[in-house]
Amino acid sequence: MATTRRRPPPLTVILFVRHGKTPTTGSVLPGRARGLHLSDEGRGQAEDAARRIEAVANLTAVYCSPLERTRETAAPIARAFGLRPRVERGLVECDFGDWTGAELKKLMKLPEWTTVQRYPSGFTFPGGESFSDMQARMADTVTRLCDRHPGETIVAVSHADPIKAAVASALGTHLDLFQRIMIAPCSVTAVAYGPAGPAVLAVNATATIGDLRKPGHAS
């Protein structure tokens, strides 16, 4: 009796997009503080990201964290595909607790800063979240989105550290090395998720995104 070979579940491609620049990007650790919007440059970056994604992908959904800067980045991307951005709380920035709103130049002088850079898996922000919990949260969010969109390509607009944590997880890289991953404002990072594990298709793309064909597809 012949057996029917079961087809593997289809791959889901998630395009992780960091929000565009704000007036405090590079100088302040904003965290989850409300009221921070994109700068004029950041709005231009979001429009450019929408054009770049539109050139290579056919999106079925656009998700973003609850914060204003990610909502404003997601808006032109969703508009390019006739979609509405959907808030996904799991994509939110790491909770920096007592460090929220602090100037980076001051934080860099703290003894704890070395731990943040070299041993993040052992660090919890005072009054906030640990890097390990953030990575676990992102992993749960990715699983939920993949279950919701099998075989589809979607966008997830988030923040630098959560995207870096997702990339490290996809690469099988220890969290203590995730600070080596660079995620620029409005860069696009593409990861395909399937039963054989994730495949990283692009990281920190700020010009052309590259070839987003799913692994195993013929030329």
Image (spheres, rainbow, N blue to C red):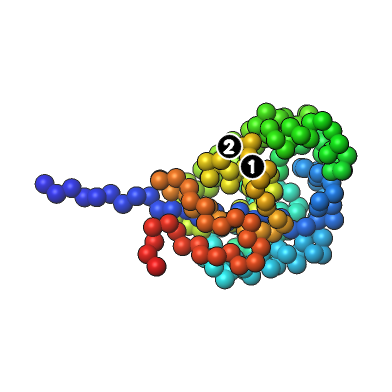
- Residue at 48%, 47% in the rendered image: 198
Which one is in front, 164 or 18?
164
Rendered view: 119 above or below 142:
above
Q: Quadrant of residue 77?
A: bottom right
Image quarter hosting the C terminus:
bottom left
Which one is in front, 10 or 191?
191
- Kind of residue at disc 2: His
- Residue at 65%, 32% in the rendered image: 121
Disc 1 element: helix
Other residues around mark 1 within 10 Å, as few (<14) / some (14–19) / many (≥20): many
Rendered view: 89 above or below 113:
below
Alpha carbons under labels 2 and 1: distance apart: 7 Å
> Where residue 83 appears, x then y in whole percent?
60, 63
Q: How many marks?
A: 2
Residue 174 marker? 2
The reply to whether dot 2 and dot 1 touch (C-beta < 8 Å) is yes
Residue labelled with disc 1: 178
Rendered view: 107 above or below 55:
above
> Where residue 157 appears, x then y in whole percent?
65, 53
- Kind of residue at disc 1: Phe
> Where residue 153 appears, x then y in whole percent?
51, 58
Other residues around mark 2 within 10 Å, as few (<14) / some (14–19) / many (≥20): few
Instruction: Let me know if residue 105 appears in the view.
Output: yes
Query: On the picture, is 68 further left or further right than 150?
Result: right
Instruction: Let me know if residue 141 appears in the view.
Output: no
Residue 30 marker? none
> Where residue 47 appears, x then y in whole percent?
70, 67
